């Protein structure tokens, strides 16, 4: 094996993870109470106190979701950030992942020793009409929200690959069954059957109601630290082997909406950092941002797990099942819980839980290397990390 040169960076480890239970509406807490709940759980798992946190990085989707402008200022006290550096991150739906990467970079650069990363959304207090009818010039008319925007891209994928129209239902059924093992998941229906998924009303052809993500209230927090902090951790840490962000415009001539170049570039960067040359064989589990079920096979190709046109075959053959060769979204994924601002961080946190062996009933046996993935906007923002059970080489 080729000797790896030292990067001079501090190794970064995840030593604490906390999530709220994700539900339609948390009427029992304010936004401040919601984020503090996740933060306290992360600190408790790491056996740290607020005094141990040097800085806070917070992320959420657009402010107009809840109508609170610059919420990081209002939330500083709830997160123990008074008198400490606090950064706000925003990259649309990928923001949770981007927030984790910014926190990791602060530790890697030795700017701070221990950082709390947190992302949230309280969609029950949102003006949800944004999802149905944004006015010109922000989107083309009559798209009827996110599903209307992405449905033509799914149809393009189906035409390009010859994928049968049953694949979306298989993904939704898999993820919702996985969610039954995850106490934090929003949608938990023990009576769900594949036939019920297939019989659900059509919202945006070919996307059925059962193949879409819910609207959730929830928050996720992680404690990131360096080598010394990891050595004091009461539980096995998850080591960050690589992280990357990429973006591209929402619309431009020649854009491939089925497999965006920014997604490919982001994956290539993070794989290079993590020394992954064959993701299909070297990654044990993937938490992929799939708000509409058809994006599982699409992202499997974009991320290099399958050749172009072959992603749907992995889904159809059971490869992505919890007991398959490449489990995808053992937590239930975005299809089972979607507090938008936190959804990307949940993917990153769930990947970290897997390599720490702390994912509970949805733990993948023998998981040592995992991918966390997030995307946002019109497939324009991407954030990814690879985490492992072992500290990365020099």
Image (cartoon, rainbow, N blue to C red):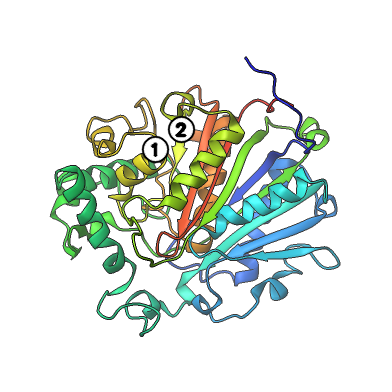
Answer whether labels 1 and 2 touch (C-beta < 8 Å).
yes
Residue beneath disc 1: 328
Where is residue 275 shown, x and y percent of the image?
58, 28
Q: Residue at x 41, y 59 (%)?
A: 379
Question: Whole-Å distance between the Cαs marked 1 and 2?
Answer: 6 Å
Q: Element type at marker 1?
A: loop
- Please tell me how crowded label 2 is: few (under 14), some (14-19), or many (20+) other residues with Cα within 10 Å: many
Vertical placement of 326 versus 188: above or below?
above
Question: Which residue is outermost to the front?
Answer: 253
Answer left or right for 231 relative to 360: right
Vertical placement of 303 versus 133: above or below?
above
Vertical placement of 272 versus 176: above or below?
above
Where is residue 5 shown, x and y percent of the image?
73, 27
- Please tell me how crowded label 1 is: few (under 14), some (14-19), or many (20+) other residues with Cα within 10 Å: many
Q: Residue at x 43, y 23 (%)?
A: 281
- Residue 359 visible (yes or no): no
Vertical placement of 256 versus 330: above or below?
below
Q: Quadrant of residue 68?
A: bottom right
Q: Residue at x 27, y 58 (%)?
A: 153
Rendered-image quadrant of the C terminus = top right
- Residue 77 visible (yes or no): yes
As drawn, the label of residue 285 is 2
Rendered-image quadrant of the N terminus = top right
Answer left or right for 212 relative to 387: left
Where is residue 386 shown, x and y percent of the image?
56, 37
């Amino acid at each position: 094996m080729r000797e790896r040169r030292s990067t001079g960076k501090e190794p970064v480890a995840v030593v604490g993870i906390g999530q709220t239970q994700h539900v339609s509406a948390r009427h029992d807490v304010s936004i401040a109470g919601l984020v503090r709940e996740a933060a306290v759980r992360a600190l408790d798992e790491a056996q740290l106190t607020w005094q141990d946190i040097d800085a806070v990085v917070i992320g959420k989707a657009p402010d107009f979701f809840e109508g609170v402008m610059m919420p990081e200022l209002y939330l500083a006290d709830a997160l123990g950030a008074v008198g400490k550096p606090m950064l706000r991150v925003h990259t649309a739906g990928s923001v949770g992942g981007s927030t984790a990467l910014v926190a990791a970079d602060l530790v890697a650069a030795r700017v701070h020793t221990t950082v709390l990363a947190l992302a949230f959304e309280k969609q029950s207090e949102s003006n949800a009409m944004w999802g149905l009818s944004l006015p010109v010039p922000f989107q083309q008319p009559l798209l009827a929200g996110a599903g209307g925007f992405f449905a033509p891209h799914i149809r393009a994928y189906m035409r390009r690959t010859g994928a049968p129209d049953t694949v979306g239902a298989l993904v939704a059924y898999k993820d919702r069954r996985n969610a039954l093992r995850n106490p934090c998941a929003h949608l938990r229906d023990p009576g769900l059957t594949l036939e019920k998924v297939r019989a659900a009303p059509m919202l945006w052809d070919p996307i059925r109601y059962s193949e879409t993500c819910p609207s959730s209230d929830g928050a996720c927090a992680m404690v990131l630290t360096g080598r010394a902090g990891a050595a004091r951790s009461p539980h096995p840490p998850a080591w960050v082997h690589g992280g990357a962000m990429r973006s591209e415009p929402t619309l431009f001539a020649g854009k491939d909406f089925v497999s965006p170049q920014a997604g490919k570039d982001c994956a290539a960067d993070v794989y290079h950092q993590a020394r992954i040359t064959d993701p299909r064989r070297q990654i044990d589990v993937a938490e992929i941002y799939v708000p509409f079920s058809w994006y599982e096979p699409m992202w499997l190709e974009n991320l290099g797990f399958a050749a172009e046109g072959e992603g749907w075959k992995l889904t159809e053959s059971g490869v992505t099942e919890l007991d398959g060769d490449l489990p995808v979204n053992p937590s239930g994924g975005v299809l089972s819980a979607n507090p938008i601002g936190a959804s990307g961080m949940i993917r990153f946190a769930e990947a970290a839980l897997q390599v720490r062996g702390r994912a509970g009933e949805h733990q993948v046996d023998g998981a040592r290397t995992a991918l966390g993935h997030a995307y946002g906007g019109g497939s324009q923002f991407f954030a990814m990390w690879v985490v492992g059970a072992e500290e990365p080489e020099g």
